[in-house]
Amino acid sequence: MTHSSESIEQIVKQVPEELQDVVARKLAVVQQIRDLKAENRTLRDEILRSGKINSTALAVSVECW
């Protein structure tokens, strides 16, 4: 939806004024999801590096949760 070099403010300015609030909120949620996915990857990598659980067990535990 957004180009990585564009800020949320730059994108919001490109839409009609009556939609700017909605677009800003949507883009903020998209950014939160991206941040959570990145954090999830980091945590997953840390878990796997610990050697206490393998990737299959981790995948199964996530699916069950």
Image: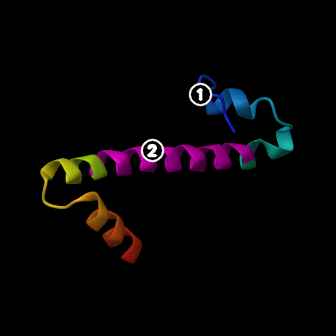
- Determine whether, in the image, residue 49 is placed left or right of residue 28: left
**Residue 5 image point, x, y percent:** 60, 22
Q: Residue at horizontal 43%, vertical 50%?
A: 36
Q: For the view shown, which residue lies furthest in the bottom direction?
A: 64
Q: Residue 42 in magenta?
A: yes
Establish if 64 lies above or below 42: below
Q: For mark 2, what is the residue?
A: 35
Q: Which mark is residue 12?
A: none
Which quadrant holds the N terminus?
top right
Which quadrant holds the C terminus?
bottom left
The kind of residue on which mark 2 rests is: Asp
Q: Residue at horizontal 31%, vertical 45%?
A: 42
Q: For the view shown, which residue lies furthest in the top direction?
A: 5
Mark 1 packing: few (<14 Cα in 10 Å), some, or many (20+)?
Answer: few
**Residue 31 image point, x, y percent:** 54, 43
Q: Residue 38 in magenta?
A: yes
Q: In terms of depth relative to the viewer, which is nearer, 48 or 3?
A: 48
Q: For mark 1, what is the residue?
A: 4
The part of the image, by quadrant, that contains residue 20 is top right
Q: In terms of depth relative to the viewer, which is nearer, 26 or 19?
A: 26
Write the start and end of the magenta stretch as one range.
23-43
Secondary structure category for the residue under label 2? helix
Establish if 53 lies above or below 6: below
Q: Measure the C-alpha gap from mark 2 to mark 1.
A: 13 Å
- Determine whether, in the image, residue 9 is placed left or right of residue 34: right
**Residue 62 image point, x, y percent:** 36, 68
Secondary structure category for the residue under label 1? loop
The kind of residue on which mark 1 rests is: Ser
